[in-house]
Image (tube, coloured by chain):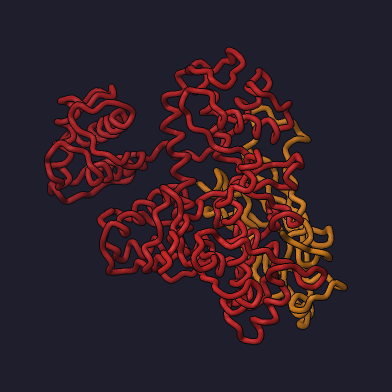
Chain colours: A red, B orange
Amino acid sequence: MAETPDNIYVPAYIKVHLGRPKENAENVTVSFLEYIKNVACSEIYPTWNETAIKTNIYCQVSFALNRIYTEWYKSRGYDFDITGSPAVDQAYVKGRSIFSDIEKVANEAFNDYIRREGSGEPLFAQYCDGKTATCDGLSQWGSYELSKQGYTPFQILTRYYGEGLQIIYDADLVVNIPSYPGKALKKGDRGDNVRYIQTQLNAVGRNYPSIPKIPRVDGIFGELTQSAVLEFQRIFELEKDGIVGKSTWYKLKFIYAAVRKLSELDSLGADIVSYSMQYKRPLEIGMVGNDVKLFQYLLDVVAAYNDAISSVKVTGTFDESTQQSMQAFQRYYGLEITQSSNLATFKRLYDEYAGIMTVRPEVSNSAREYPGYILRLGATGRDVRNLQEYLLYISTRNNKIPGLIVDGVFEKYTYESVKAFQKEYGLTQDGLVGEKTWNEIARVYDEYKNSVAVAKQYSGQKLV
Amino acid sequence: MTVDESFGILRVSVQSGNGAYPVQGAAVIVYYNKKVIKVMTTNRDGRTGEVDISAPPAALSKEPQSKYSPYGVCDVSVNKEGYYTNIYRNVQIFDNEISNLEVRLIPLPEYAKGEDTFKVFDITKHNLAVTGGYNG
C-alpha cells in the first residue's frame, strides 16, 4: 500500500521578482496571502462565478508552491522565489487594486493546492487563457465555461490535468505562523487559541484604535472579544460575523506580524541608539562589530516600511543576507550597487531611517507587550528595565506601590514592587511577572499615561 | 449618470509599516478621464468612503472578446505629509464589483528633494485582456 506523502508547508512570505528572471527589477517580499490575491486579480476577472475563481486559484497556488518546492529560481542562483511576469510565471502587478469577490475566495483558498496521488510535490499547474493560446494545462476561459455548466473545481482540474489528482486543503504555514485550528473560534469557546487571538487583537488595536481593547486576556471568548473581532473584520474588509474563521485567523496573523515587527524594532532601537551614528568604514561580508549592528538595524527599520527591501537579522556580523538587503536598498534608491557598504549608502540609509522616525505614530505612551517569558528575581535586561519603568511610573501615581531603581536588574526592590502591585490588583502575590501580571501592569500604566482615572475596586480604594 | 450606466465601486485604505498602522488624514484624490471626481480623507482606520466609477457592462468580461475593454479605469493619488505621495494609474474597476486599493505609504527621508517625492504605479493591462496571454 502506497504511503501518503507528507503535506508540504506553505511559506508565510514569498519573494517576487517584478520582471523576467534576468531583467534588472525589484524583488518584493509579500505575504503568500497577498501574493495569491494579487495574482488572482491580475489573471482572472472578478465577475466570474465562485467555482471558476476557486479553480483558477488552486492552479495559481500550486504553480507558485511548485516553484518554491523545487527551488526553481534559487537553484539557478537567483535570490527570489518566483517572477511576476506572466510570460514566464504568473502575473503579479505591484500596486494593483484587489477585487472583493476574488479576495473572499482567496482568503479561504490561499493554502489549498493540487498534487498527484503518491507525490508530495505541488502540481506544476500550467495554464493559459485558452483563447489566443492553448497549452498543456488549464484553459482559463475553458474553466469558466465548464464552471457555468455546473462542474466542480475538482472535475474541471481533472479535465485539464488528468486523473489521480488530490486537492490538499488548509496546508500549514511555515514556522512561526500557527495554523488555523480547523474550526472557527466563536463566543463561548475557551482555550489557548482564544488567548492567542486576544493578545494579537490587543496588539493590533494599539495601532488601530477603533478596535476595542480586550481588558482580560483570559482565553475566554466573550462579548468583548467578539466586539474586537467585529471591528477588526470591519477595518480589514472581512465578513463581519464576529467569529474567527480561516480568513480572519490568517489576516490577523499577518497584521500582527507587521505590528510586532515595529514593536521589536523599537525595543532593539533602545539599545542601538547608544551607538555612534557615524559612518566608520566600508562593511563587507565577514566583518563584525557594533557598526555592523547599526547598519543592519537601519536596514531592518527601512525594510519594515518597504516590501522591496528584505529584512535583516541584527546579529552584528555582516553576512550574505545583509549584503542582499543592502543591494536591494541601493537598487530601490538608485544608488550604485556595491559589494560592500559605502558612505553614500550609509548616508541615504540614515536619511530614510530619520524620515521614518519623524512620522511613526506616537506609540511610546503604551507599555510594550509581554515579552513571552516569566521575569523573576535575578533576571536582567531590556525587558526588566521596561518593567521597572512602568512600575516606577505607577508608583508615582499610587503610593501603595513602592518606588524602585530602573537599572535593568530584577533585584529585591523590583521584587517588592511587583508583590505590592499584585496585592493591590488582586493577583497572586508571588513576585513573578508572567503574562497575567505583565498585562495588568501594562494596562494600569497605559491608563495612567493616558490620564484616565483608574477606579479599581480590588483594594476598595479609588486611585487618582 | 443615467440609470442604465454600469459602474463599480472604489474603496481606498492607506497604511504604513507594511500594514502595521493606518494612516489617518491622507488626502485621496480620484481622477476619471483626467478630471478630479472625488477628494476624500482617510479616517482613523486609514479608510475612505466609496466612489462610484463608470465601468463597461459585466457581460464584456464573461466572454473572451478583445474588442472592448471589460473594465473601467481611474487614477488615484494619495498624499500625507511626511510620506512619499503614491500615484496609481489605470486602477481597474469592474461593473458591480468592489475594488479595494490597498495603499502602503513609505516615509520620506529626512532630506527629501522635491521631484523625488512621488511613487508612481502604472497598473498594467489585465492579463486576460492582453492578447496572446500564456503562462508556463
For the question of whether residue A37 can be seen, the reply is no
Position of A280 compared to A228: left or right? right
Residue A375, how many percent across, how many down? 23, 35
Q: Nearer the viewer, residue A223 or A280?
A: A280
Q: Is residue A277 above or below residue B17?
A: above
Q: Is residue A129 above or below residue A23?
A: below
Residue for point 68% across, 30% down: A330
Position of A318 compared to A205: left or right? right
Residue for point 73% across, 75% down: A141
Residue A334, how many percent across, how many down? 74, 31
Residue A200, how many percent across, how many down? 38, 52
Residue for point 16% across, 30% down: A415
Most extreme residue toward the right, as rendered? B67
Most extreme residue toward the front, as rendered? A1
Residue A210, how many percent across, how many down? 45, 56
Q: Nearer the viewer, residue A345 or A23?
A: A23
Q: Nearer the viewer, residue B96 or A16?
A: A16
Q: Nearer the viewer, residue A460 or A234?
A: A234
Q: Is residue A208 above or below residue A277?
A: below
Position of A316 compared to A215: left or right? right
Q: Is residue A188 above or below residue A91?
A: below
